[in-house]
Amino acid sequence: MCRRYAAPPPCASRPVVSCLTHQGGGDMTESDAAPRALSARRRQILEAAITVLAGQGWRGLTHRAIDRAAGLPEGSSSAYYRSRSALQTAMADFVVGQLATDVEALAAELEECPGDHDRAVAATTATFRRWLDESDLLTARLELTLAAARDDDLAAQLRDSREGLTSIVGDILARGGHPRTDAVSGTIVAAVDGVLISALLRPPAHRARFVADSLDLLLGSLVEGRPAE
């Protein structure tokens, strides 16, 4: 059976790699879209848009619905993001940026404790649990990913972010003493997407345990070459 981890244990000397997932137009500029450069009002609008998208899907994502969710006067969101394309691009940048911030923080934590499989599972589980507990961002990312299958510009936008994520995973592989290959890094990122989707479909009380068990199996069998227990 998979081991149980309540909190990250002290550093040990066991091989490790962490798996992370971590996936236009209008009046926006690239700097406007970046989460760290957003004005308070743009952030408020995008957070409301994510809430609406997660709860109602693309059909429910209207300027009026966003304004209501944000508690703003009607017409506020359209003043910042006039077209659906501009709104979609801004939302994708915001979602990717928020998740990337968590991934970078997790990578920094794991860098302090290289070689510790148990710590990697516990720390990564904690990050994923936050995403699942506040699932609007994760659900919006999945909606954007599905939309990207029909939108070349959005697909390119998300593909760039995924390549950056794969590179981060590759760095963690290398620090853990494992060969760095795009195939392994890409497989880890894809596998984690599946774990998160499966976790969203489970009752909230069961999600953390499922994620911890899945990560333990994934890291052990895929990276260390140890058979699943």
Image (spheres, helix red, strand yellow):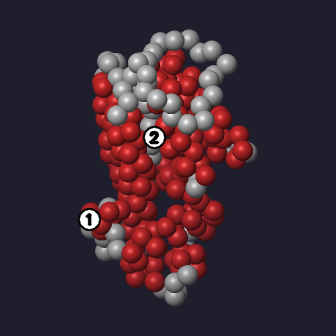
The N terminus lies in quadrant: top right
Q: Residue at 38% across / 55% down in the picture?
A: 97
Visible residue check, residue 187: no
Along the line of sight, the residue nearer the viewer: 198 or 160: 198
Decide: marks 2, 1 in contact (CB < 8 A)? no
Q: Residue at x 38, y 39 (%)?
A: 109
Label at residue 31: 1
107 over 2 or under it: above or below: below
Q: Name which quarter of the figure residue 177 lies in.
A: top left
- Dot 2, how many residues are within 10 Å of its Cα: few (below 14), some (14-19), or many (20+)? many
Q: Amino acid at mark 1?
A: Ser
**Residue occupying the point 53% across, 42% down:** 126
Q: Secondary structure at mark 1?
A: helix
Q: Residue at x 46, y 68 (%)?
A: 46
Q: Which percent across, then down, holds residue 153?
A: 36, 54
Q: Which mark is residue 217?
A: none
- Looking at the picture, how far across and down is residue 108, in whole percent? 34, 40
Q: Which residue is mark 2?
A: 21
Q: Which of the 4 quarters of the picture holds residue 61?
A: bottom right
Image spot of residue 178 (x, y percent): 34, 18
Position of 32 with respect to 102 (left or right) is left
Front in this rendered view, residue 89 or 34: 34
Secondary structure state at the residue bearing disc 2? loop
**Residue closest to the far bottom:** 73
For badge 2, the amino acid type reads: Thr
Q: Which quadrant holds the C terminus? A: top right
State how far apart marks 2 and 1 are (Cα).
23 Å
Mark 2 or 1, nearer chain start: 2
Residue 156 screen position, x and y as percent: 35, 48
- Residue 103 drawn above or below residue 72: above
Q: Quadrant of residue 38?
A: bottom left
